[in-house]
Each structure stands twice: as structure tokens, then as C-alpha cells.
Amino acid sequence: MGPYLYRPLEHPSDIRLLRLHAAPAAAAAQFEAPIQIDIEHHVWLSPAAKLRFDLDAAYHEARGELATARDELEACKSFQQFANRDLGQSRTDTHHAQRQTHAYEVAKAKFDEQSASYRARRREDASEATRPPLSKPKYVAVSYAWGTDMSTETISIIGEDGDVQSLRVRQNVAEMLRYLRISSSDRLLWIDSLSINQADLEEKESQVKQMGAIYADASRVVIWLGPLQNSGHLTHSYTENRRIKFSFHKAGLEPSLGLLKLPWFHRRWIIQEAGLASEAILRHGIKKIEFQEFVRRIERLQRSAEAASTAFTPEDRVVVDRLRAMANLQTSSRGQFLPRGLMNLLLSFPAAKCSDDRDILYALASLSVTSLPISYHMTAEELYMDFARLEAIQHPSILLSVAGAHPTSSKFLPSWTPDWRAQSIYQPNTNRSFDSAYKSKIQWNQLIMRDGNTLNVMAKQMDEVARVSTPHTLGAWVRLCSTHNSESSIAENIPELDLLKALTRSRGDLQRLSSDQHATLVRYLGSSSSSDERPPKFVERFITESNKTMIGRTCFITAGGAIGMGPEGIKAGDVLLRIPDSPSFTALRPQYESASIPLQHEVELDPGFDHAPPFIDLPSRFCHEYTVVGDCHVPRLVRTCPDRSALGLEDLTPFKIV
């Protein structure tokens, strides 16, 4: 019996299905008899549809390249306009403009060629009689955790001519197949590790592109959690008298805290696998439960556990939140694709794991309308940069906000590219507060120019950070406000109110305070007396929620005397920009050409605060590069700065971000 060799798929739209042979009638033999399967090639599209598939792919690729080239050319014109206005024409600028013009002409010629073929094919389709679609077989798609074990078991592959070949699989796959086979008939399955030739990168790329459709078209998705470890499964459920008890369930699968620790619940691929399923069933050994019912019960279990002071861990809460989002996705889509951007999905599902860093993006691609090419020939850094370039031309401020939340330690990534391998250090403001209804009179492609690893952004500098609160606690923030005297001519509590506004702005579930509550809270926080009087409940609640808000954040005072909140890594000397597409501000850090900067006089630094050296002699345009710090909220700048809808290109200056 020789080893099985995968036969190439004839077309990228074709798929392989596994025909799992029926198990022996005896129950005991089900787990002892050898596993036998057929690997069948299934044509998913008719010949005419395959031609349309190829033409559509080429057409949309050419259209995407043309749009990118057009955006680059428009951005180049905007920056060239600034160069002509303020800097004088340079040879470098002229050569760059010529390159962009040539790139646009090449992309336009390619698009025109593909567009002609595309339109001709559409006319042929319209003239042909309507043909019935191909009959697709009913199959079950399996969602499971791959694991890290080596391939140690052998299964038998029955060829078309009856020859038997062997295929090495991991132990958990063999175990899963024994549980999934039935004695009454064969089963048609799609299992990614076996249905895709993992050694063929081209095939893997084409199959990953259509994995969302594969799970959506399946008659059912079986979620395999693994075999039961013991003869019974110990779970705890909530009774009517609000006590936790343990019970043994012989038939249905009952949710439990222990189940949430299983590897499947922490995978990234499960989001699309369960979220796009028309029907999903969880299997744990011989026990099973419908996915939607499982989520409802685990939510009840969470509420009951918290009521009984048996709190879920933070990781458990993240898993439950993800399951809830997946259940909502399945309910709303029922196998249909939703119009969501990939950036939105990445921010919605930050903690799910995968073994390949590229799959952090690819695992969500089928849920997104973002056109992201799938390629396992590029590195993770190259993929992250390609995605960042796509996002930069649409929403530059969101990209910079997320880049600050996911800073990179890789020398291959610029600061404006989020490193999705890094855990988020703060919740980006723009994830909650971005105003999608806002329309700027400046087109996005006039704000951004990408040149290699450099991102040039047209923005207006609004202020500069002067002092930063350390440590990053609410008490330190309040002390910073109380020592701030730059607004003495304004009402006494304006600085503290600005601090509270910064806090309430940054977290959507933080309680909004009335004017009276503001006054009470400011008075309580500013009081230096050691009164034993218990503060009002809303004060305690505000402090509790503020501590959550402050994760990864700190308070600062600008050179103009405004109070704001930004990433905890912000420093004195960082500049605050307004990009016309954003309701918030972006902090950048100047990168000076020289390490030795002469001071006009020495400045004594107060302990506990980071001061900017206010009297530094810098040549004109001494700083020509910046790195990303992150997004900030500065209430007074929002009140006093010009309306962003009034900003024109003549008000903006280019900032070179590296």
C-alpha cells in the first residue's frame, strides 16, 4: 500500500470532498475498524461559469490596480501642489510624479484590455439561453482545532480503480473521523487539512479564497470539540433557586466553564466557519448541541456564575463575547456575506489565535468586502504593509490610531503599519467614534501619498504635548489638572471637566454625567480632606469605569494649555495633528536628524511629570520624519479648532511618517 498523492484540481473553483465509508454495525467496532475514505473532485462551476470566474478575477484585479494607481497619482498631484507652493519644485518630486503618471497609464491600458474581454463575455452570456446550474452534492463541513501533534496515524484512501493508498494524519483527525462516521451510510465531508493539498501553496491560496463559500454552502457545519475524556462529562448548570450544582448529562451537551478552555474556542478560523454556517452543531464525543442554543446557555451560565460570585476569568469573558458575536453573525447572515470591512472585523475579533501570522487577516477575509489578495508566498510583514496601504487611502486616521494600538517591534514594518501579532495596548478611539456620515470636501486620495515604507499625510498641526501624567492613574491625572494654571481666566473647574470629558469620550459604556454630577465628582476628586464619608454610588461607578478606560491611556497637557488623553507612551514634544477625515487627533513623534540639540537654557524637571524642553533651537524644518504614537482626544481643541469640514488643502501641511 503506497502513499497517497494528491491529484491537482483542474480549476481554482473546484473542491475535494471526502467520502467517509460507513462504520461496522457493531458499536464497539466503530472505534476499532480501519478508517477508509474516498477523495472525490467536485466541479463547482460549469465551463461557461469557469470562464466568467477567470474573467471576473482578471477584471476586478485590473480595476483594483487602476484605482490604486489613480489614487497614487491624485495624492502625488496634491503633494506636488504643496511643493510648488511652499518648497519650490525639486527634481525628486518631478521624477516621482513621472513614475506615478507612467504607473497610471500602464494600469489604465491593462484595465481597458480586461474590460473589453469582460464586456464581450457578458454580451455572449446575455445572448445565450439560460442554463440550469450544476447540481451540487450535499456535504458536511467540519470545524475543529488542528492541534500541534505530528501525523502518527494512517488512514486508507480508496482510489477510483479500487487501489488502496495510505495517508498519514494527526491522531485527533483520525479520532474525529471515527466519531463522525455512521453505520447506516457513507458521509460526504469537507475537512480543510485533508480536502486541501497543504503542500501546494497555489492550491491553498485558491481554496482559502473560497472557504467562506464552502462553509456557507454546506448543509451543516459540525464543530468538533474532541472526545470525552471520561465516561461522563461533569458540567455545572444553574438551578431555579440560584445555586450552582453539578449534574451528569447522558445525551445533550451542556455548556460548562471547562468547555471554554478547549482549543476550538480560541481559534481564529472558527469565526467564519461557524458565523457563515446555515446550521452549526457542536459535538463533544457522542454529545451534541445546536450552536445558537449553546451560546444562549453559556450566556445564562455566565450571568448565574456572576450572581453566585463565581466570576468568569477575563479570558472566559473574551470567549463568550466572541461566541455571542459569531451567533449574531450567523443569525444575520445565514450563509450570506455581510458588508463589513476587514479593519472593522480585526478590531471586533482581536484575541483569537492562529498558528500562521498571515492567517490573522486571511481567517477573516471571507467575512469582509475588503479586496485582500491571498498569498502564502509573502511574509506576514509584507501582508500587513499591503493591507495598511489599502486602508491608508480610505481612512488614514483610523489606520494611524490602530497602528498606535498595535506598535511593532519588527525592523521590517514602519510605525504606520499595525503589527497584528502584537496585543492591543489600548482601545482605539476611532473604532467607536469614527463618524462615517462625515463628508470632507477633500478626497481621501488627496490626503495620502505612499512611497515605499513612507506614508505622507496632509494634516494640520493643532498643538504639542507639554506635560504627561505619571503614573498613569486617575489620581495622578487629577493632580496634573489641579496643578495646571494656564486657564486661570476661565471657570475654575474647566481643566477637571476637560479631563472628565476625555474619559467619557473614550469609552462607549462609560456613564455620561450631568452638570450636577460633574460638579460633585470634581469636588470629590479635588478634595484633599481625609473624610471617611462614602462617596455617592455614581462616583464609585465612574471611578471603576474610568480605571477600565485608562488601560493603555494617560492624561497630558498641551503647550496651549489644553487637557487631553492619549496612549500611555505619549511624551512631551509629540505633536497633535488633525487629519480632515477624523473627529479626533493623531499624535506623532518627531524624529530629529541630530542627537545633539542646543538648549537656550537648562530646564529643571519636576518629579512625576515629563516636560518638553520648551526652548530648543531647531533649524527650519529640522524634523522631516515622524513616527506614530496613536489617537488622542482633546476636548478644548475640539471646541476651539476650525470645523474639519472647513479645512482645505491650502490649510494642510505634509507629514512624512516612517
Image (spheres, rainbow, N blue to C red):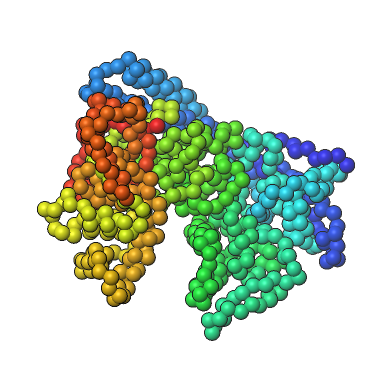
Q: For the image shown, how many numbered marks are present on the structure? A: 0
The x and y percentages for residue 481 are 24, 55
The x and y percentages for residue 49 are 59, 38
In this view of the protein, can residue 300 be seen by the observer?
A: no
The x and y percentages for residue 218 are 63, 54
Viewer-side residue, 6 vs 497: 497
What residue occupies the far right of the structure in this picture? 1
Residue 581 is drawn in which quadrant?
A: top left
Q: Where, quadrant-wise, is the C terminus in this rendering?
A: top left
Q: Is 136 left or right of 73, judged from the image as shown?
A: right
Q: Is residue 354 above or below residue 575?
A: below
Q: Is residue 63 above or below residue 420?
A: above
Q: Is residue 420 above or below residue 318?
A: above
Name the residue at 49% across, 76% down: 307
What residue occupies the far left of the structure in this picture? 489
What residue occupies the far top of the structure in this picture? 91
Viewer-side residue, 368 vs 428: 428
The x and y percentages for residue 39 are 76, 45
Viewer-side residue, 97 vs 65: 97
Name the residue at 57% across, 33% down: 378
